[in-house]
Image (cartoon, coloured by chain):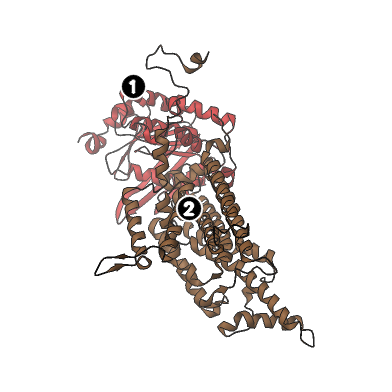
Chain colours: A red, B brown
């Protein structure tokens, strides 16, 4: 299986503190992966590096069939290349309608002039409708997204992520603030998405990870501590010591 | 769900109608039309106010919509004025020189004419040579092109450098203010080639036009109204679609927009340059009505006023900017013109010419604290009282209630 994203030997330090230390990670074309680890293990920094927000001190991040170097690309270009990210705290554009939020995320030319003369086509409208249906916001399309509840904002953000049609989704704590039924819906959605693309889920909740039933990577102090099935890593004594034992 | 541009932006039509009524009313009350209701100088004030409204729209676009608090847009406004002023001064001096040399025994050579114009214009700064920047001053079309090109290119280069290095927030404001100050200080120098602190004057006289000032003032009023109307529609169109969505997204959460795959820098640069050009066009219409432009007009304080107008009028809505600019600049003219009676307090007399700025500053603080939506926010109070559009909802709260479609049958 060829890797879609390959991170090798990446290190980054902030003011002498090594947030990421010689981290290597790779994920295939259509794979679901969970990343777990205690606070400060470097989960968010890892996502920042992959999406171009933080530049590492050393290491390589390669992307796709052409093995493009993501470290040389700016955030917007990386996103255009097919890397989508969902933040831990839902960040939607609160003073704009749900429809506008989804339309903005919809996969279309991103240039300023293309956008200026862009008018939504029938197909685009239909797609936005489908996405809203998928995330349960069909009745809220014309509502301002600031009026939505926390859980609905989470869903809207997932909808925006889907609209981008990324090849790799980085999903930070998707289930935070969701009811049990919604969590189940989320796991089903993530599992089905991972059939056609790569999905990386960062999560604290072991139950949630168990339900995903996928390969797990455990991070600790900026590097990979263990990798394998959930049962395999939870049996690892080092994992038990740093993470589960507390 | 598909609606026309006007249907989605009803304020555009209302604004254009009000602007047309205003222009017509002022025209009918003018000297040129035989009525004696409005003096020519007051018509010029109104025409200038329309230009200020236009630059306020530009400021609203860059600040209220895109979140860039630029303290440099009055510099672009002034540059536009300088560009048109160069032609006005050159062409008018050329006519005067031609008249005075007409009676000479030997017809003057083109070089002599040019020298005579030069000493007329630059005598005041002790020079008679044309600086290189006046190379196109003889041609109206070229100088009109420069009205757009010079501020546009300045904004493009400045914006490219600033946005590319991710300068944002208050640091960007300081940077734009530094640019404005540098430009103003440069123009103050006699060596700048734009007559130093004398500036360009006599701009109210259109070369080769026989009509009196009463007509000229009216023409400029019409031109300013037209520019304001077109500028309003254009800006409303720019912010209406997905482009507007992205721009407002940049204002609210720049990083998020970036992760959606939009090049934030490109969008900022577009808005910055676009609004600089609008500001320059407004300036090119303003200064012929003012009659004079000098480097003081470009000083940073003018750009700060611009931000105050937009804040008082209401950020993030185009008509708010227009209301703010019109109200504050007209009230300012009223107060500083000595038309408001002083308030004798016994020991001290409040003279409004001096105290107006204090009043303006106070109202700015109060608006920021208690009415962040500005004067334009009053429109929300009214529209909130009008029944909202509830089409498509059920008639009643029960599951069995008739839907709108059923009820219509």
Q: Is residue B253 among the parts visible in the rendering? A: no
| Residue A177 in view in this figure | yes
Residue A121 or B188: which is nearer the viewer? Answer: B188
Callout 2: few (<14), some (14-19), or many (20+) C-alpha neighbours within 10 Å?
many
**Front-most of A132 and B113?**
B113
Q: Residue at x 39, y 54 (%)?
A: A57
Give me the disc on residue A181: 1
Same subunit, labels 1 and 2: the answer reads: no
**Direction left: furthest residue:** A246
Q: Position of residue B6 (x, y in %)?
A: 56, 38
B296 shown above or below A238:
below
Q: Position of residue A203 (x, y in %)?
A: 32, 34
Please name the residue shown 38% across and 58% down the image: B170
Q: Quadrant of the N terminus of chain B?
A: top right
Report the chain holding disc 2. Answer: B
**For mark 2, what is the residue?**
B62
Gap between marks 1 and 2 measured at Cα: 44 Å
The percent coordinates of residue A41 (x first, y second) are 29, 43
* For residue A35, above or below residue B23: above
What is the x, y in percent for residue A182?
35, 24
Indicate whether A20 appears above or below A246: below
Residue reaching furthest to the bottom: B105
Q: Vertically, is B229 above or below A91?
A: below
The chain holding disc 1 is A
- Count residues near mark 1 (Cα–Cα under 10 Å), then give few for <14, some for 14-19, many for 20+: few
Q: Residue at x 76, y 82 (%)?
A: B102
The residue positioned farthest toward the right in the image shown:
B106
Question: In the structure shown, which secondary structural element does the residue marked by tag 2 occupy?
Answer: helix
Residue A229 is drawn in which quadrant? Answer: top left
Q: Are marks 1 and 2 in contact (CB under 8 Å)?
A: no
């Amino acid at each position: 299986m060829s890797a879609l994203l390959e991170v090798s030997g990446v290190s980054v330090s902030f003011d002498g503190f090594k947030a990421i230390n010689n981290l290597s990670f790779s994920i295939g074309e259509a794979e679901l992966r969970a990343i777990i680890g205690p606070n400060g293990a470097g989960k968010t920094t890892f996502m920042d590096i992959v999406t171009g927000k933080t530049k590492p001190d050393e290491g390589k991040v390669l992307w796709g069939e052409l093995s493009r170097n993501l470290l040389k690309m700016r955030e917007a270009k990386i996103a255009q290349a097919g890397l989508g990210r969902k933040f831990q705290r839902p960040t939607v554009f609160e003073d704009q309608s749900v429809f506008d939020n989804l339309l903005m995320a919809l996969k279309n030319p991103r240039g300023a002039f293309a956008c200026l003369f862009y008018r939504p086509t029938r197909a685009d409208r239909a797609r936005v409708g489908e996405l809203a249906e998928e995330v349960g916001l069909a009745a809220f399309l014309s509502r301002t997204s600031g009026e939505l509840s926390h859980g609905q904002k989470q869903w809207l953000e997932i909808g925006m992520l889907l609209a981008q049609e990324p090849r790799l989704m980085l999903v930070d704590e998707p289930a935070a603030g969701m009811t049990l039924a919604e969590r189940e819906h989320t796991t089903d959605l993530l599992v089905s998405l991972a059939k056609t693309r790569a999905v990386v889920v960062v999560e604290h909740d072991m139950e949630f990870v168990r339900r995903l039933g996928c390969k797990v990577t455990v991070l600790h102090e900026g590097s990979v501590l263990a990798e394998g099935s959930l049962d395999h890593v939870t049996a690892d004594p080092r994992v038990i010591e740093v993470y589960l034992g507390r | 769900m598909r609606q026309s541009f006007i249907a989605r932006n009803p304020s555009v039509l209302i604004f254009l109608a009000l602007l047309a009524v205003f222009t017509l009313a002022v025209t009918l009350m003018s000297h040129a039309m035989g009525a004696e209701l409005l003096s020519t100088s007051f018509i010029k004030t109104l025409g200038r106010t329309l230009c200020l409204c236009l630059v306020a729209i530009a400021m609203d676009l860059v600040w209220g919509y895109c979140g860039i608090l630029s303290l440099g847009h009055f510099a672009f406004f002034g540059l536009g004025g300088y560009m048109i002023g160069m032609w006005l001064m050159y062409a008018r001096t050329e006519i005067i020189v031609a008249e005075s040399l007409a009676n000479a025994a030997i017809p003057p050579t083109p070089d002599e004419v040019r020298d005579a114009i030069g000493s007329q214009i630059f005598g005041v700064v002790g020079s008679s040579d044309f600086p290189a920047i006046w190379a196109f001053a003889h041609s109206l079309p070229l100088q009109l092109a420069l009205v757009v090109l010079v501020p546009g290119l300045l904004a493009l280069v400045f914006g490219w450098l600033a946005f590319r290095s991710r300068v944002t927030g208050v640091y960007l404001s300081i940077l734009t203010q530094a640019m404005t100050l540098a430009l103003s200080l440069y123009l103050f120098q006699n060596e700048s080639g734009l007559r130093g602190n004398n500036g360009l004057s006599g701009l109210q006289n259109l070369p080769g036009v026989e009509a009196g000032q009463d007509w000229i003032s009216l023409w400029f009023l019409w031109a300013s109204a037209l520019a304001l109307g077109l500028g309003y529609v254009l800006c409303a169109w720019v912010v209406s679609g997905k482009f507007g969505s992205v721009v407002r997204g940049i204002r609210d959460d720049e990083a998020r927009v970036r992760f959606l795959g939009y090049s934030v820098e490109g969008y900022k640069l577009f808005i910055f340059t676009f609004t600089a050009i609008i500001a320059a066009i407004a300036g090119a219409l303003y200064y012929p009505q003012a009659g004079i432009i000098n480097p003081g007009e470009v000083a940073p304080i003018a750009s700060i006023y611009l931000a105050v107008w937009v804040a008082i009028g209401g950020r993030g809505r185009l008509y708010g900017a227009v209301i703010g600019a019109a109200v504050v600049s007209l009230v300012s003219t009223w107060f500083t013109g000595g038309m408001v009676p002083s308030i004798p307090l016994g020991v001290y007399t409040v003279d409004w010419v001096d105290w107006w700025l204090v009043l303006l500053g106070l109202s700015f603080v109060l608006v920021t604290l208690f009415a962040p939506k500005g004067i334009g926010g009053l429109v929300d109070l009214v529209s909130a009282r009008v029944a909202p559009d509830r089409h498509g909802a059920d008639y009643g709260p029960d599951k069995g209630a008739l839907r709108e479609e059923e009820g219509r049958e």
